Image: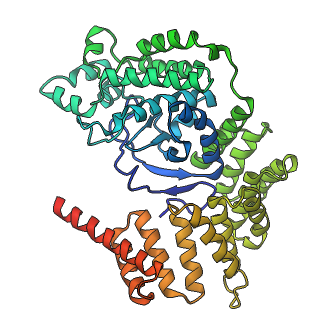
Amino acid sequence: MRDRVFLRPFAVFRRLKSVASAAALCVALAAGPASAQSVLRDAETEALFHDMATPLIKAAGLDPNNVDVVLVNDPEINAFVAGGQAVYVNSGLINAADSALEVQGVVAHELGHVVGGHAIDTRGMKQASNISILSLLLAGAAAAAGGGEAALGVFAAGQQAALGSYLSYTRGEEEAADAAGARFLSGAGLSGRGSVEFFHKLLTMENRYGITRGDEAAFYSTHPLTDDRIQFLQDVYEKDPAWTKPSDPVLEERFQRVKAKLFGYLADPAMTLRTYPEYMTGVPARYARAYAWHKEGFLDKAMGETDALLKDAPNDPYFLELKGQILLESGKPADAIAPLRRATELTGNQPLIATTFGHALLAEDEGDPSHPHLAEAQRVLKAALSRDRENPFAWYVLGMVYEAQGDTPHAELASAEQQELSGNIGGALRNAEAAALRLKTGTPDWLRAQDIALEARSLMATAKKRK
């Protein structure tokens, strides 16, 4: 269900219907699909993405309530769409970006693909099911593996067809997404400087990895080459009134926080401490180091960083969430309850934070036969799931609460929900069938168990036919 046993502020989930089939194109850095396609969920990050993207989504004529910007656990500098109204942003892109404005430029471009319907285009690329902003680089993985000569070699011996299928989206579609992204940035009153700056990063990558330039490369590429796109975009953006408009300083500050938080969560602790040494006392540095010290098992040092953050911002819900989580994961659930309860209250019962709070309540009851916190844990978790059902960890903890209460049928149903979201179709079927046998026939929970079992059987039958 999760590939880490700590640091619940970031939750690692599998989103079967959206991400598992969206293997990112490897361009310039690796010669194969990205190894990780897990969704990283974090309340602070999702709030930031929402606020960064909402003006662009509105400018695109879409409903912000129906469009998601999703963080993917993948070190490639990449973003993509995979059908539906969702933009997927890799963790590697956040790490590479220097500003929120750069990320907004990327999101605007990807929204151009969404509005253009490019992600549901059927002309090949079924293996990857995505559009990569880095797929404009010549010959993708071949170039990364062997430089310019290898990139040209991919066209020999009948490889043109394979490449054409893999890099299926046409120059026209990329140009249309660029133009649409420029319109969305302009409509949102945002400068295109971030978009241009980000494409300069891509140009640096092209030059660093020796990707072939010139007419032959441009002819075979299915996307405009980066310097061409920079020139086009700069010509468009410089004419826009927002070109010289500064970015939102509050949004930029929030972005630097989230960038450091993500780095501290994903990077090796030694790397985090080199990148954010102890003489750096700003919020991003303390944020990153709190994760590093916690991952290394230094509770006192992790608490020192977290308490320093809270000293200046005692009601910051995300600092409170981090403190509660570190205490919870360090075996101190009683101490974790107060900061997590406060974080939950300050965010209006934000589902991810509330789930961690419910987990702390359950953990505090372990070994206590009277279970004084179970009723509250159940209320908190059910409220969280009423707002966000695609949270397998919340279902897992709720199932444990039901089991501790002796309510086996509802524990089995919660487990079925969790297994379905986690991709364990067999486990979902077994638990749903067991729950249906014990639940009262005709009730909403009994019907839900039947639905999960029916869907699981259908998926298993489809998988069997494909063999």
Q: Where residue 120 sits: x, y (%)?
A: 32, 39
Q: Name the spot of residue 296 as percent of width and height, x first.
A: 65, 55
Q: Looking at the rendering, which quadrant does residue 161 occupy?
A: top left
- Farthest residue to the left: give it: 157
What residue do we see at 68% from left, 18% from top?
Answer: 245
For image coordinates 54% across by 18% down, the residue present is 196
Occupied quadrant, residue 54 = top right
Its colouring scheme is rainbow
Q: Is residue 167 left or right of residue 48?
A: left
> Of 229 and 119, which appears nearest the observer?
119
Q: Position of residue 352 (x, y in %)?
A: 62, 59
- Residue under the image location 42 percent in, 33 percent down: 115
Q: Observer-nearest residue: 349 or 366?
A: 349
Q: Is residue 23 left or right of residue 197?
A: left
Quarter holding the C terminus is bottom left
Whether residue 86 is visible here, answered yes or no, is yes
Please determine whether, in this image, residue 100 is positioned above or below residue 69. above
Compared with 99, 311 (above or below) is: below
The answer to whether 262 is drawn above or below residue 370 in the figure is above
Q: Position of residue 428 (x, y in %)?
A: 38, 73
Query: Which image quadrant for residue 129?
Result: top left
Residue placed most toward the observer, 453 or 219: 453
Residue 271 appears in the picture as rendered: no
In the image, what residue occupies the spot 79% across and 50% down?
316
Disc count in the image?
0
From the viewer's perspective, is 27 left or right of 158?
Answer: right
